[in-house]
Amino acid sequence: MSLTLRNVSRTFAGASAVRNISLSVQPGEIVGLLGTSGCGKSTILRAISGLDDGYEGEIEINGNTAKEVHDTTGFIFQEPRLLPWLTVLDNVIFGLKGEHADKQKRAKEYIADVGLEGKEKLYPRQLSGGMAQRVAIARALVTSPEILLLDEPFSALDAFTKMQLQDLLLDVWKTYQSTVVLVTHDIDEATYLCDRIVILRGQPGEIDREITLTEQRPRKRGSEELARYKADILESLNLDRARSIT
Amino acid sequence: MAKSTGELTGVYIREHTKKKERNKKKKKQTEVVLLGSILPVLLFILWEFLSRQGVFPAYQLPAPSAVFSAILDMAATGALWEHISITVYRVFAGFLFGTIAAVLLGSLVGFYQKAEHIFDPIIQAFRSIPSLAWVPLFILWMGIGESSKITMIAVGVFFPVYLNLVSGILGVDRKLIEVGKMYKLTPLQQVRRIILPASLPSFFVGVRSGLGLGWMFVVAAELMGASQGLGYLLVLGQNTLSPETIIASIILFAFIGKSTDWLLKILEARSLYWQDRFAKT
Ligand SMILES: Nc1ncnc2c1ncn2[C@@H]1O[C@H](COP(=O)(O)OP(=O)(O)O)[C@@H](O)[C@H]1O
Ligand SMILES: [Mg+2]
């Protein structure tokens, strides 16, 4: 499995959203796209997923540069996006193909993996935000995607649920060794999860800097090492100056 | 041992609370029915009382008892069932044809932009014609038989179903469509697994208001020319100067119309059990 972006740019009705993004992601790597709101993180992720095919440049997944959704990619959106008329179990089954009994068995395993055993029969309206996002994670993982794309997946959750789900993501990553591209605006999340952080800046967004984190996992939240990375990132985002301008 | 008794009591309590909850629900339902009946019952009593006092002259507004005895008389001769069944048949047939046409055309317009460009302007134009204005034309074309009546009712039912279905389909959340795209659903699967269920709530709104219009149109159709049906009873009552026949017909319309809406409502609740809706407590 490989993922490479070459000179990817995207314009919306004449306005450039991102420009000249080139990025190569190693198999099994967790890469974070970090940047302020509106700098084009989602735009890049949607281009990789194939949901958006209006970009220029080339995105190569396993040697395939077709501008379409690939079987090997899974997407976890910012909102759970569960189908409200399906139960938890049927939502997780949604993207699976094959024999019904097999699908059911497989989905149940993943539901257990995300800690929702016994909740299979509930409908989305009966779930809390954290539970719904867990279901979304199970739905994305159950098809065993080689590349997992996440667009600020935990940003709407409370601090505790967020930490739980971040650890859950690391668990499944360890088990399935998928390649992960994680969009986030949360620096702590990025330093806790990622092997490499790509910092986007400006409008249109461009790659400003890449930071490779060598820190062993499991990492300690709030450790000095991560704090140093955070200071470094804050420096590059230059938030202080940005604030004094606006 | 201690644990198993604990579990047993746990199970027992759960069963018990379930039963309690069910009883509570039933109690609440009867309460709702009772609350809803207070005003109608009071009105009937007042009406009967005032009629007997001679406040309303019987040739204008007969007492409820007179109206009910009129209904019972018709029931005894068997005429009542014929009137009711022919009217229900007309509404049902018109409703069926109107809904089928609306679903076919609505799906086409909802799914294909070309079809929208072709059909929607003309449908919108026809919509602005008050549907009752068609009556004379239909009678001219098809005579005063069943077909003109059923066509009229179908026209009345068509518009609300069509409009709500189209807006339901066009209003399906793009975010859910994207989920389908991520799983590479074919267009047909996209329709069956996402668009149809997602537009079902809106479809039911259309079907229920369509049925309401169907009842309105059956009255109009039967007023225009019929020898049977509840609407015909209205004309008959007018011509024979018997207000109890008219009021009996009105009450039957209200009762049967409400019952059919209630049936649809049950069907709706069954199909949309997953909806997260605001419910008053
Ligand atoms: N579908 C779209 N149509 C028009 N403009 C868009 C669209 N999607 C994104 N944009 C614009 O592109 C820029 C980047 O947006 P986005 O990728 O969503 O940012 P981020 O995810 O980093 O917050 C923004 O200026 C946004 O207004
Ligand atoms: Mg975004």
Image (tube, coloured by chain):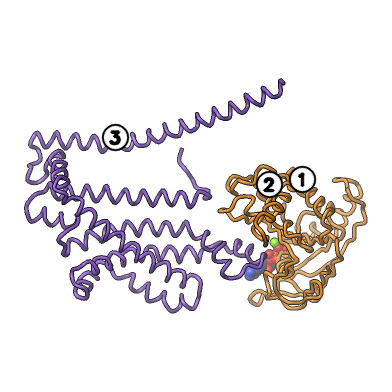
Chain colours: A orange, B purple
Q: Is residue B105 above or below residue A230?
A: below
Residue A99 % position (x, y): 66, 59
Label 3: chain? B
According to the picture, the residue beneath numbered tag 2 turns out to be A130
Image-based side of B120 in relation to B57, left or right: right
> Ligand 2 is located in which of the four quadrants?
bottom right
Quadrant of residue A241 in the image? bottom right
User: Which residue: 32% across, 56% down?
Assistant: B212
Residue type at mark 1: give it: Gln
Q: Foreground residue, B170 or B70? A: B70
In contact (CB < 8 Å): disc 1 and disc 3: no
Residue A164, which numbered label? 1
Label 1: chain? A
Q: Foreground residue, B116 or A145? A: A145
Residue B193 % position (x, y): 57, 62
Q: Residues within 10 Å of mark 2 (few under 14, many from 20)?
A: some
